[in-house]
Image: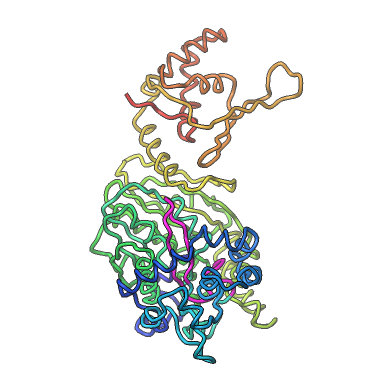
Amino acid sequence: MGGAGLSPFARGAPDNGSVSTTHLPTADPARTARLRDALLAAAFTADGLLDLLGASAYAALARSETVPALRATRGDGPLETLVRLFLLQQPVARARAAAVLPVEDCLTDGWLVPDAADGELLRASVDVRPYGGPEGQDWWIVSDLGCAVGGAGGIAGGGAGPTGVDRSELVLGVGGASTTLAGITVRTPVADALDLGTGSGIQALHAAQHATRVTATDLNPRALHITRLTLALSGAPEADLRQGSLFEPVADRTYDLIVSNPPFVISPGARLTYRDGGMGGDDLCRTLVQQSADRLNDGGYCQLLANWQHVGGEDWRERISSWVPRGCDAWIVQREVQDIAQYAELWLRDGGDHRAGPQEYAARYDAWLDEFEARGTKGVGFGWITLRKSGSDTPSVVAEEWPHPVEQPLGATVRAHFERQDFLRTHDDAALLATRFRLADQVVQEQVGLPGAEDPEHVVLRQNRGMRRATKVDTVGAGFAGVCDGSLPAGRILDAIAQLVGEDPVLLRDRTPEAIRMLVEQGFLLPVAG
């Protein structure tokens, strides 16, 4: 999760005023610009990092395994120096650092600090990670040391973190959840965007590229400070940074886009601000969804990642759909389900509980299972929720399970999903048959049947873009889809097919609109305007 804590109900959470922002750099504009120029000059970028490390060491670094990267940076070139400083947290001789960086600037602002054991060595005070923007931009994500690779990397137990800050307050960097959210976000130009629970500022950085004004909130003031660093170092405009829980810091504002990678972990406590929301069960994600409509402008989107409980005797689709506020369309996609034992073990490892000793580990494991048992939880789903404030009296709420590979980025696919819902909502069967359609790009047809058979058992249409869906159709549906090139209304095509197969055209017109609606809803057929 890129976001830090959001909930004011976090059990055992520190008082806001006690959260430390010490050991963090400042971002003087002129000095930060010189640092950015030095990083670019040394090719300390996502592409440069891959070229230096190679695919194997690069992938290992994303898994929190640093040995291959240490071996790949045994040289003394500029890029090796920066990787050792900012990614591997290794001390570097002052003279070596000065050959690459504006050292006095970095010491003044606190990006570098003298090594405690040897003043001739310098260390980085934060992790600075190259990150490629969607249009080839070179950005850098700032986070706490030891928190940037592969999520928490098991560092988030009790006690002090690598910087002397309590580990519950540490701010994570780039992880799978944050890149997933960035990939599904609708990127149309907007006036106002909100990054709720900003963490290290990844979503705010993306939003700054297409929003006139960006607001970023977090319960943890340390996260707000780090977001400021991420934006400044990446050359993005400043954001309106506000401290507080959920929508409390922005109760006076509405937005065209809200994104959130919240602390969605369903846990028996709230030890770790970045992951544990502090509300019972999945109440934090439910609250975010339910309160979002009041903070959205008409036509605005709210997009978040979430965990949700699978409760015995309830359909998870109906349960999560019930969260959707009035006047909002929703698309809820479940990407994965874990049983409660798997889920508890995953987050116990994340929190470093496996190093607490057998008895302590067993006690904490028991606490997770007790929590699930008390709530009737049989499993936990993970996925994304997108809301659009349509104002419709007949909202479209789609909840589906889709564990299959998708093509990121999906922002355009998400936007198109809601545009198709608008179309279907306003077209009855007669209007549907009067519409011209075209087959979506890169849809292929597969015929399945016994070898040598005259006719296939069934026909499958398969998308090679976006959600990469596949759906069975009959021969009429396949023939209809194959002819759709935008030149003829659907009804005219059906009349021609009826004549070809010897079927009553009236009956064919009566029974086919349902299949057309399905193909439109899933994105196989696209309405042609005009």
Screen quadrant of the C terminus: top left
Give the quarter of the image for residue 293: bottom left
Residue plotted at (42% across, 78% down): 111
Q: How many numbered discs? A: 0
Visible residue check, residue 273: no
Q: Position of residue 446 (x, y in %)?
A: 63, 28
Residue 46 vs residue 35, the one in the foreground = 35
Residue plotted at (54% across, 22% down): 477
Residue 74 vs residue 498, the one in the foreground = 74
Q: Is residue 326 above or below residue 103?
A: above
Q: Is residue 158 above or below residue 383?
A: below
Residue plotted at (36% across, 32% down): 423
Q: Position of residue 430 (x, y in %)?
A: 37, 20
Give the quarter of the image for residue 356: bottom right
Does residue 504 show up magenta in the picture?
A: no
Residue 427 vs residue 439, the one in the foreground = 439
For the record, the magenta segment spans: 128-154
Does residue 149 show up magenta in the picture?
A: yes
Visible residue check, residue 309: yes
Give the quarter of the image for residue 8: bottom left
Q: Is residue 469 above or below residue 81?
A: above
Q: How is the image coloured?
A: rainbow
Residue plotted at (48% across, 73% down): 127
Q: Position of residue 120 (x, y in %)?
A: 50, 88
Q: Position of residue 250 (x, y in %)?
A: 28, 65
